[in-house]
Image (cartoon, grey):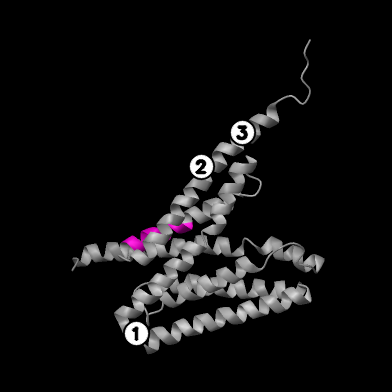
Amino acid sequence: MLPTGLFSVYLGWSTAAGIAGNIFAFVLFVSPIPTFKRIVKTKSTEQFSGLPYIYALLNCLICSWYGMPAVKTGIILVATVNSIGAVFQLVYLSIFIRHAKRAIKLRMMGLIAAVIVVFALVVIVSLGLLDYNERQTFVGYLSVASLISMFASPLFIIKLVIKTRSVEFMPFNLSLATFLMSLSFSAYGVLKEDPFLYIPNGIGTILGLVQLALYSYYSKISEDASREPLIVSYA
């Protein structure tokens, strides 16, 4: 057991890391607002997909459950951030469904129902069939799988940037927020000695760093290209 002074420092650092993670995650949660302002304005979902918000909703629900005291004590900041995230995803999905075509509307409602059923089954199984330690492991592995599945989006963006040699589809602010959020929750997981937190967020930190490095590299290429003369004279 840590001495009182060291424990206070440890508690302070872990809380600070968790709060920082919540703040940076909030930045990511509000980032789709311009997209949904456009949907509301045009009264159409155009070519936008609602699937990322379905995945995000399931991820937030599972990770929120993992942070609850019934599953794991001492990591309530994981529950708070993901609970807020789940609310944001539900709002976004509600707007999307309202302005989607009928076929897409029915499909999205079915997917939301499926997410609720899956989450309900996770809660029922973890509470009804597993003891406390088994519950941590079961929900912990599910949260890791859910978080890792969310990395498909950064990987797609990284591939797109390399292919197009342009950072047009990778805003710097979102890349920075992703990196800082993952870094904060990695530190939170390390301080809480929780591999179910620091392993997936460690992967997210690396991907965020790669995005920032690519942004720095390809933004310089774009700047250099813009400085080249539009008309070259061969006198």
Q: Which mark is residue 213?
A: 2
Q: Is residue 184 magenta?
A: yes
Pinpoint residue 186: horizontal percent, then vertical percent.
Answer: 39, 59
- First in residue order: circle 2 vs circle 1: 1
Which residue ends up furthest to the right in the rendered image? 42
Q: Which mark is residue 107?
A: none
| Label 1, label 3: how far apart the Cα atoms are | 55 Å
| Few, some or many residues within 10 Å of mark 1 (<14, 14–19, 20+) | some
The answer to which image quadrant residue 100 occupies is: bottom right
Tell me, yes or no, if residue 166 can be seen here: no
Q: Quadrant of the N terminus?
A: bottom left
Q: Which mark is residue 130?
A: 1
Q: Which mark is residue 221?
A: 3
- Front-most of 64 and 18? 64
Q: Is residue 71 magenta?
A: no
Which residue ends up furthest to the top in the rendered image? 235
- Tell me the residue at 50%/71% (across/down): 82
Q: Is residue 91 above or below residue 150?
A: below
Q: Secondary structure at mark 3?
A: helix
Q: Is residue 216 left or right of residue 126?
A: right
Q: Secondary structure at mark 2?
A: helix
Residue extent of the magenta highlight = 181-190
Q: Is residue 147 left or right of residue 106?
A: left
Q: Is residue 138 left or right of residue 46?
A: left
Please name the amino acid that badge 2 sits on: Ala
| Few, some or many residues within 10 Å of mark 3 (<14, 14–19, 20+) | few
